Image (cartoon, helix red, strand yellow):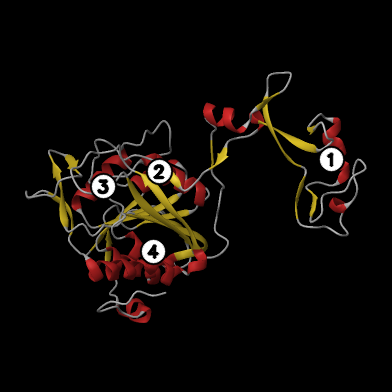
Amino acid sequence: MFLTYENKKSEKEILDCTKKAALKSLSGKASANKLIQGDNLAILKTLLEDCKLGGKVDLIYIDPPFATNGHFKMSEGRANTISMANGDDIAYSDTLVGAGFLEFLRERLIFLRELMSDKASIYLHIDYKIGHYVKIIMDEIFGRKNFRNDITRIKCNPKNFDRKAYGNVKDLILFYSKSESPTWNDPITPFTEEDITRLFKKVDKDGRRYTTIPLHAPGETVSGRTGQEWQGMKPPQGRHWRSAPEILERLDEQGLIEWSATGVPRKKIYADEKEGKKMQDIWEFKDPQYPSYPTEKNLELLKFIIQSSSNQGDLILDCFCGSGTTLIAAQELERNWIGIDKSDHAIKAAKKRLADIPSNLFSRVEYEMLMQK
């Protein structure tokens, strides 16, 4: 499926006709980490063609404008993330809407795809009003087969707005990969006490909580070890043993198999031997109450994404980096990073937050500061 709208360019036109940015270094020292101020579209083309970073970026997170048709301001050194600004101290403007906004985003996504390595993923943060259109654009650029998740992010506590609609406490993260084999460090979340009581209902003589699972799984094995007889029985029709009979015998000797009154065996799974549960697609990472920049995101949210979809030494890119939350998370998790933003306020806030990373906890933050000429 494709979205059609007025003035939609071809991919070739976008890649060939976009002008590059001429960059000047303000730090005077080259570094793998870069904070760049300027128009991100032109800078992305420069990174692709002049910096030879095509296929080198291992993870992208972006939190672009949401087509709100408003301005966001700074007030007395603190971000105002709710009201639209009437004053002069505007942090950034979000006035591009409709087809113009979709094409603005599509142009950047095309360059981001070219920068991504084969193991890379991209997480795009957007709101519910425009996100459904953005997903179709991402299907077009990255392929529907590379769509991983539509993640619901709980962003705030419930509000009692006086309008004829349900309250809104969420936004949306669209998760895609470059290929069918992205980096994936299957994230686990700890069990709560309620989880343990609900999922591990049985208690052994030592007071350990456990549950049981079948010893067999779907699928016949005609000639393998897992299709053979064990303890005088074969797996049910259309199924096979999860382990070879000799392994099942060893588990039984260790007391890890429970036999029912009718002679049905099941494997014991103990709560204290499990790290936790698989992370699902509803996340509760609420935004900071007193952000240093409008729409600043939760640091733990970015750490979670980076840990899930990258490894130490990988290159992380955020071309709408705002006050630098992605960069801080990448730095603290020992990844390399590139951050881009156009706003003076954003760059100032990012530099301050990077400088505030405790030197006793992490190595000194070194990065090259670049600016579009």
Q: Residues within 10 Å of mark 3 (few under 14, many from 20)?
A: some
User: Disc 4 and disc 2: Cα gap in Å?
Assistant: 21 Å
Is residue 189 or residue 214 the one in the foreground? 214
Is residue 148 or residue 232 the one in the foreground? 232
Please tell me in which quadrant of the rendered image residue 265 appears.
Answer: top right
Task: Name the element at disc 2.
Answer: helix
Q: Which residue is mark 3?
A: 295
Q: Which residue is mark 2?
A: 301
User: Disc 4 and disc 3: Cα gap in Å?
Assistant: 21 Å
Residue 327 visible in rendering: no
Q: Quadrant of the N terminus?
A: bottom left
Answer with mark 1 or mark 4, whichever residue precedes in sequence. Answer: 4
| Contact, mark 1 vs mark 4 (Cβ under 8 Å) | no
The image shows residue 50 at horizontal and vertical percentages of 37, 70
The kind of residue tagged 4 is Lys
Can you name the residue that lies furthest to the top here?
206
Q: In the rendering, which numbered label is found on residue 135?
A: 4
Is residue 191 or residue 339 the one in the foreground? 191
Q: Is residue 155 left or right of residue 160?
A: right
Residue 119 visible in rendering: yes
The image shows residue 103 at horizontal and vertical percentages of 28, 71
User: Disc 1 and disc 2: Cα gap in Å?
Assistant: 41 Å
The kind of residue tagged 2 is Leu
The kind of residue tagged 1 is Leu
| Contact, mark 3 vs mark 2 (Cβ under 8 Å) | no
Is residue 237 or residue 61 the one in the foreground? 237
In front: label 4 or label 3: 4
Q: Which residue is mark 1?
A: 248
User: Disc 3 and disc 1: Cα gap in Å?
Assistant: 54 Å
Q: Is residue 361 left or right of residue 190?
A: left
